[in-house]
Image (cartoon, grey):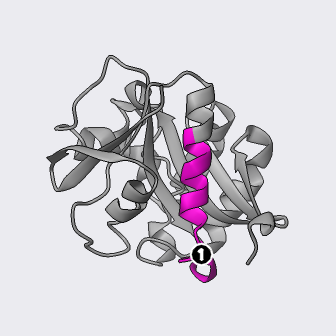
Amino acid sequence: MHDTEINIVRLTSEMSEDYLNFFDSTPHSTGKSEDKCYCVCWTSCSGDLEACATSEKRRETAMEYIKKQYIQGYLAYVGDRVVGWCNANVKSDCYECISWRMFMQNIKREDKKVKSVFCFAVAPEYRGKGIAGKLLTRVCEDAKKEGFDFVEAYPNISFIDEEQDFMGPVSMYEKMGFIEEYKADGRCIMTKKLN
């Protein structure tokens, strides 16, 4: 696979069908249809658990959230096929989202302008080919252009399993120039200074 084959694009409402089709057809997490997340719990909307109760409700919620720009991030394309996704949103906008409230209460809140990287999903046949790194590079490039002070990520301190390690490995962030700030709740809080 050559670098020219991969195109990283910021998610817009015009790409909602591509996004939904990626989650419809790409095994991730447990690989079970009922567990498809559509990434609706890491958003700039507080949401509610009812909107996440089933994969059908999550899909419907994702359509709405994409239109309202609550779900933010980047898609990786090979040709016209989406092969990867990275959820990257404004940290301070996400403090009330479902997953933050459930899993991130001990992560420090910031006064600085921080872009948070919450998750990656890559099609199985494209894993191990640098897709997540390319997505992360684009997040950092755009965040710098947009005046963010830092990009922050929350990988597990130690690999658990694919279902729970959706935030990417510590080694990828280290390779990209992130440093460990502190640890909380089994996560390594890593930052990359942009300015």
Q: Percent position (x, y) of residue 72?
A: 58, 39
Q: Secondary structure at mark 1?
A: loop
Q: Percent position (x, y) of residue 187?
A: 22, 53
Tell me the residue at 41%/76% (across/down): 30
Residue closest to the eye, 4 or 19? 4
Tell me the residue at 24%/51% (across/down): 188
Q: What range is drawn magenta here?
A: 123-140
Figure quadrant of residue 2: bottom right
| Residue 131 on the magenta span | yes
**Residue 169 visible within the image:** no
In the picture shown, does residue 165 fall above or below 51? below
| Residue 42 on the magenta span | no
Which residue, given by chain and number where applicable, does mark 1 sit on? 129
Q: Percent position (x, y) of residue 60?
A: 61, 49
Figure quadrant of residue 119: bottom left
Q: Is residue 151 left or right of residue 191?
A: right
Tell me the residue at 40%/45% (across/down): 50
Q: Amino acid at mark 1?
A: Lys
Q: Residues within 10 Å of mark 1 (few under 14, many from 20)?
A: few
In the picture shown, does residue 183 fall above or below 48? below
Residue closest to the eye, 48 or 191? 191
Determine the residue located farthest toward the top in the rendered image.
111
Residue closest to the eye, 195 or 165? 195
Question: Which quarter shows the N terminus?
Answer: bottom right
In the picture shown, does residue 3 fall above or below 53? below
Q: Percent position (x, y) of residue 183?
A: 16, 47
Q: Is residue 187 left or right of residue 73?
A: left
Q: How many marks?
A: 1
